[in-house]
Image (tube, coloured by chain):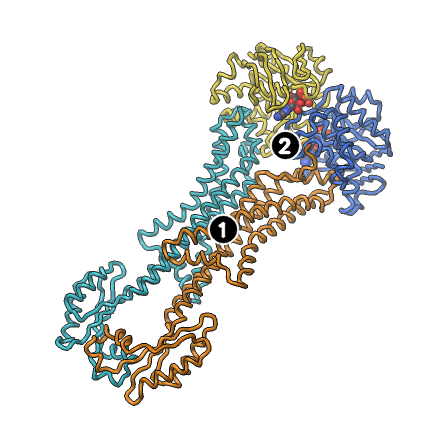
Chain colours: A blue, B orange, C cyan, D yellow
């Protein structure tokens, strides 16, 4: 499903941000990724959703070595991955509805086929009254929930979430993690970067610990 | 409910700048194209006015009958294709011309040349040089005066003007390209984060390119419309406001709206070419910039 | 260590578009100003060429001595300020002129008018109309021929051109203003979040305005330089490349670089006015946009 | 010091985001502001740092009613307030050093006078190796620390921080809160919006609880 082999990463000529990182996830796994600020969690996730190429090592996604994929094949791979960015990356000129629906639209699906699903999910994350609103008027936690809804709307095979609960209250955080767990039950492989020790403990899932770019189990 | 919003914002400041730049480009280019056409018409108009009337002088020479010579020249002229009218002027007309030189007193004793006024058909003018030789061969003391010097001077000036306005059109086009390129890049730079999100969410390059093209096409369409309309308004104002003074500009500007058969198509085409060029430049730039942007994203 | 960076980014896409827009505006305006000056010089040049040479005809009248009349006219001319040279042409010159009209044979029996060639000082031409009357009063059979018709025709054409190029300058200025205004707004829109942070962190409005002015001033400076240089290069190329063909443009373009005393200041000023205007427009727009932006922040 | 009297806020013609909010802080107070996502915490802070005008009620800052202040007097008031935005709002074209130094520069101080202070503070929040770097290459937690450094550099009389520890690990979060506490000891009044219950409990400070725009003590 997902196999990371002896990966190294440096930005430009800077220091190594990731060193010899090796791990794998089977289909249906649910794991946390944690570590102090600046440890390289976001960088590792960026490699996994193909926003960045590693300086060293190989990444296998869905059974194929990513390096061997043609550029034109990458969009299809990306569409199987759901993403929650640490800084949300909502499109400010689109309504919450359109933001959440984005992965479906990009995949060429028609409005009529996904309209109800999108509205249901928006309702589920508690944004029903904000569906028509533009992101710049949302509160921090509301933005984060919209970003999560966008990541899961297409029922991806792999879900990568970068601190998806940093801006919401503990109650809501638990609710959102249940969303991930439900998705996981349906077969989605989930990897979540988080700082929230209590939340991670509550979920009782394996935890990858990064420190200065090195993975310690 | 607001659904299916545009992939790229419709009304951002950089896009508005692009529209302004393209509109200004179109406007100036329409002005330049119009100026070229105006100058061309004015030259045709002037040189026609000069060329439609020729004069033949027939000198009175001691051993020839001047009246016979005039008749001979008229005969030649009547047979020439492109000559609409040829008319011998009375002796008085010639005397009037010579009076300031010689004084009226001496004239009646003198052999005064006869004048023949020749009107030429605008559309199918005769070969003036050939006609000149023909007349000289038939009647040696006759001379064709075709106002050549005048025409040459005007043509030289018009040629200069024509070169200048083409040059100006070229320079406007070049600077417009520079500006549109820069404005298009700014539009794409402003939308870089959107491109990135779309890319990461799994959009094909084609999908992103089509969405951006749509923005540029509608921007180009409005800009072209504004620029074209502005140019036409200027020429219309030139034509109508300038009416009081008969200074040639107004007349020529008005003539822009009088489109003779056949020519209309080209005039329209050359005006439409301007916004089309703007749109194509904007599209090409945006496409190139987008592709460079995307190729930097793995 | 990188410290004290500029308050607003130096090299953002919207700023580059503004520089491009201002540079293009300056370039086109320099072209238009140059064209106006060129046309003005060309007209002066042409009409001088025509006006520097006058001809006086003195007719041979039965009861007067033509040689005395010629001498009298020459005397009048010598006393006239602005006449550089006056010279009676030999009778042969007059006969040559009349020959095509009358035929060489009859001429020796005829009273042929004498011609006086008059060269006028370019800088301080005499009052032609007054001179005409003076000559006619002194010597009734003498007539001054000042090529007026020619001059009038050329002046009309030049006037038309002059109006057109002023109009083009005005239109370029207007569209440039529109463009610079739009580009300046885009620059400020792109920097809105910076303005907001500075405002919230306690910056005085003056502080923010000064920081932005600095960007616009340096943008305007570079744009002006580019535009001015571009314009000068075009005129230089016109002057040097056009050398082979003596079509008037090259000569006139070259003359742009020959700056007579006194005039130089104005020429330089009119060229410099162009980037200055661009900078002032950009500054005003940015200031107005900034103030509107700030006043929307409590 | 800070007195909020029966304040109401609505954005445009939307619903009331804050209703009848009344509270006050004495000089030297240290308080937390909490409540579920979308409760109005950020909105309340925005009112306090004068980024927004209330629809109703009055705000007194440093003893003066804000409404009675002339526009030209506001910058001086703002310079007495330190801000941590929920979304950081670092200036991307300035180095971390310049971002942190911004409030001093805006106040007209000279580089030579603050250079060492800024470097020391950057070191204290653990960003010493990043002082020259531009914010877009920082990790989420690094951005947050730079934002905190910017808020405290001028030793403000009032510190308003909107979820200043949402993106950092618990160890670092505690360290940063100690920074606030140290400042508080020197006389700064501190108000922190947070979701982190364990952190708030550890500090043992009074907590304002917002819910749907209403304050419950
Ligand atoms: N684009 C970049 N260029 C250079 N350095 C970068 C870039 N992105 C991240 N870094 C550096 O790489 C290191 C790891 O960053 P990363 O964002 O992966 O950390 P993180 O574990 O997600 O931290 P946090 O919990 O604070 O989000 C940091 O020191 C960061 O400054
Ligand atoms: N500019 C705005 N225009 C309209 N509504 C807004 C605006 N800013 C915030 N809101 C709305 O006001 C409400 C309160 O927002 P606020 O940001 O104050 O919440 P918050 O308590 O900070 O939440 P969070 O913990 O998620 O950051 C939210 O429902 C939000 O959507
Ligand atoms: Mg991170
Ligand atoms: Mg908030």
- B280 vs A96, left or right, is left
Residue B56 place in picture, x, y as percent: 35, 78
Q: Which residue is mark 1?
A: B231
Residue displayed at 45% across by 43% down: C278
Residue A125 visible in image: yes
Q: Which mark is residue A16?
A: none
Question: Dot 2 falls on which chain?
Answer: D
Kindly indicate the quadrant of the structure image that contains residue D142.
Answer: top right
Residue displayed at 45% across by 36% down: C284
Kindly indicate the quadrant of the structure image that contains residue D13.
Answer: top right
In the foreground, D153 or B252: B252
Q: Nearer the viewer, mark 1 or mark 2?
A: 1
- B224 vs A43, left or right, is left
Question: Dot 1 falls on which chain?
Answer: B
Q: Residues within 10 Å of mark 1 (few under 14, many from 20)?
A: many
Relative height, residue D3 to residue D150 (above, below): above
Compute the Cα span from label 1 to label 2. 48 Å
Residue displayed at 45% across by 70% down: B122
In the foreground, B105 or C30: B105
Assign a secondary structure to mark 2.
helix
Residue A47 visible in image: no
Residue B28 place in picture, x, y as percent: 49, 51
Q: Which residue is mark 2?
A: D135
Assign a secondary structure to mark 1.
helix
Residue B154 place in picture, x, y as percent: 39, 66
């Amino acid at each position: 499903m997902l196999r990371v082999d002896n990966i190294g990463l440096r930005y430009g000529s800077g220091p190594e941000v990731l060193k010899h990182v090796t791990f794998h996830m089977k289909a249906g796994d649910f794991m946390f990724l944690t570590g102090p600020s600046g440890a390289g969690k976001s960088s590792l996730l960026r490699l996994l959703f193909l926003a960045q190429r590693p300086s060293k090592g190989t990444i296998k996604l869905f059974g194929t070595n990513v390096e061997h994929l043609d550029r034109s094949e990458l969009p299809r791979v990306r569409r199987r991955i759901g993403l929650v960015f640490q800084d949300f990356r909502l499109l400010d000129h689109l309504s919450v509805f359109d933001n959440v629906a984005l992965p479906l639209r990009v995949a060429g699906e028609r409005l009529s086929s996904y309209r109800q699903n999108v509205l249901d999910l928006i309702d589920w994350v508690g944004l029903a009254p904000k569906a028509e609103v533009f992101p710049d008027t949302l509160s921090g936690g509301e933005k984060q929930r919209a970003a999560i809804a966008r990541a899961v709307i297409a029922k991806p095979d792999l879900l990568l979430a970068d601190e998806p609960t940093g801006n919401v209250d503990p109650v809501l955080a638990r609710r959102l993690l249940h969303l991930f767990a439900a998705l996981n039950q349906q077969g989605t492989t989930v990897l979540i970067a988080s700082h929230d020790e209590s939340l991670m403990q509550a979920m009782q899932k394996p935890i990858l610990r990064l420190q200065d770019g090195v993975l310690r189990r | 409910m607001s659904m299916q919003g545009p992939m790229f914002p419709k009304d951002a400041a950089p896009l508005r700048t692009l529209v302004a730049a393209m509109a200004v480009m179109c406007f100036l280019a329409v002005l330049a194209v119009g100026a070229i056409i105006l100058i061309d018409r004015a030259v045709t108009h002037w040189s026609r006015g000069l060329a439609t009337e020729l004069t033949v002088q027939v000198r009175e020479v001691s051993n020839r009958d001047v009246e016979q010579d005039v008749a001979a020249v008229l005969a030649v002229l009547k047979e020439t294709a492109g000559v609409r009218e040829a008319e011998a002027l009375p002796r008085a007309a010639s005397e009037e011309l010579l009076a300031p030189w010689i004084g009226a007193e001496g004239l009646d004793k003198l052999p005064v040349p006869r004048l023949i006024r020749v009107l030429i058909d605008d559309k199918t003018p005769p070969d003036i040089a050939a006609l000149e030789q023909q007349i000289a061969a038939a009647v040696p003391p006759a001379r064709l005066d075709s106002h050549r010097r005048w025409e040459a001077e005007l043509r030289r000036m018009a040629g200069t003007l024509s070169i200048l306005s083409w040059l100006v059109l070229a320079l406007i086009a070049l600077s417009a390209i520079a500006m549109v390129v820069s404005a298009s890049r700014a539009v794409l730079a402003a939308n870089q984060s959107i491109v990135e999100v779309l890319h990461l969410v799994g959009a094909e390059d084609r999908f992103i390119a089509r969405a951006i093209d749509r923005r540029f096409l509608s921007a180009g369409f409005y800009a072209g419309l504004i620029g074209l309309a502005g140019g036409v308004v200027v020429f219309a104002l030139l034509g109508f406001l300038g009416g009081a003074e008969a200074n040639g500009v107004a007349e020529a500007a008005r003539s822009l709206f009088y489109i003779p058969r056949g020519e209309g198509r080209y005039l329209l085409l050359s005006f439409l070419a301007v916004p089309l060029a703007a749109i194509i430049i904007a599209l090409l730039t945006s496409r190139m910039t987008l592709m460079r942007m995307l190729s930097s994203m793995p």
